[in-house]
Image (spheres, rainbow, N blue to C red):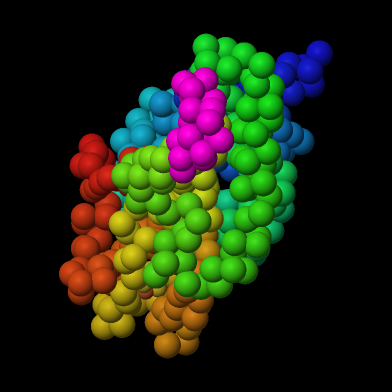
Amino acid sequence: MLQLQFWLATILQTCLRMLPFPARTGLVAIGEPGPESPVLLTCNFDLTVRRVKRALRGIDCWLLVANSRGVNVWCAATGGLLSNHAVISVLKTSGIADKVQHRRLILPQLAATGIEGKRIRQQTHWQVVWGPVEARDIPAFLAAGQHKTPAMRQVTFPWLRRLEMAIAWAFPISLVTALLAWLLWPQALWPLIGLVWATSILVFLAFPWYERFLNGKQKHTGFVFFDFGRFGVPLLLWVLVMVGLTGWLAWHGNLTAEPLLRGGLASLLVLVMVSIDLMGSTPLYKSGLHEDRLWEVRLDVDLCRGAAFCEDVCPRDCFVVDRERRLATRPRADACVQCGACIVQCPFDALSFVTPDGDTISPDVIRTYKLNLMGQRAQRAA
Ligand code: SF4
Ligand code: SF4
């Protein structure tokens, strides 16, 4: 019965993933934890909380659920919803300090774009440890003495996850499609819904192909097929399609409202699907809408002390820290998705972004201004 509930909730929350699903915040005891048991923290997106709890089955530990307004870790941390304040608040109000004797807090690595480890330490005296990207790696991470392998640090996008994202996009768009088709073209309702699902699934399943195709050029070219800028270009394309369709119908002596409306609806659907920036909805690619995709991370070697926080939080494994020289290097800089996590976490402000015009975006700006889903930065409370 519990399994059935788990899967039904998972299906619902996958289909409606764009909506927040808040779980109860606070402290959860997993197994029979004691004063030396590890303390982990996650967001309060219900799907994430259930997955983390499932990954932790059989381990005695404490789980803190922080308020991210029901949004997943990556989006909430990047957008300022899973903030320093949310972490400090749950540490202070949950009673965890009375339950354990240590002060080590394991945070999800993907929260490193928004939560400042240094600030949490200064304000609460809890030491922050960045856990693995995937919840399923937590048992191995704990068993290895809270040590992450390079593979645990990297974001991957396996086919099952891609399928999940395809469903998350296709479901709400097919609801809108069903409504429009019902009003304008009832006979084509199912073919149009099929078109939406097929486009979404094809886009996501073909991701490895884009990656090979882009091959490190993405920061200069944007996302070739899907970077249509804001809204002007898709609209212009649609107008061109409609002009072509009108000409074709006139040529065949069938210029009536009905085929125009139907052709307009089908072409609009395809254009919407390929221009809503599906790639940018993953932690693996920078959105074509975000101007930051053109920025580069700059390392000031004079400020670097080899603290290796950058290496620990980079989801693309861009850094290697030379422990002897106490200096960071970026041998895989081309893989950067400009998430800013390394800049947010560097305790010596040795990292910053540089724009194509040569302007420097300082660490303070990156820490203060959060990205919304349209790629616009807005100041958010810390
Ligand atoms: S860049 Fe910053 S975080 Fe990375 S090794 Fe240097 S001092 Fe440490
Ligand atoms: S190097 Fe790029 S991908 Fe890696 S943490 Fe920094 S900004 Fe993010």
What span is in magenta?
A: 244-265
Q: Identify the residue at image location x=65%, y=21%.
A: 188
Q: Is residue 260 magenta?
A: yes
196 relative to 245 in the view: left or right: right
In percent of width and height, residue 127 lies at 43, 51
In the rendered view, does 157 fall on the left or right side of 258?
right
The percent coordinates of residue 27 (x first, y second) are 52, 26
Relative to residue 351, is residue 325 depicted above or below? below
The question of residue 253 being in magenta is answered with: yes
Occupied quadrant, residue 51:
top right
* Residue 93 in the image: above or below residue 223: above
Pick the residue in front: 297 or 138. 297
Residue plotted at (42% across, 67% down): 221
Q: Is residue 267 visible?
A: no
Most extreme residue toward the bottom is 325
Q: Is residue 66 above or below residue 131?
A: above
Number of numbered discs present?
Answer: 0
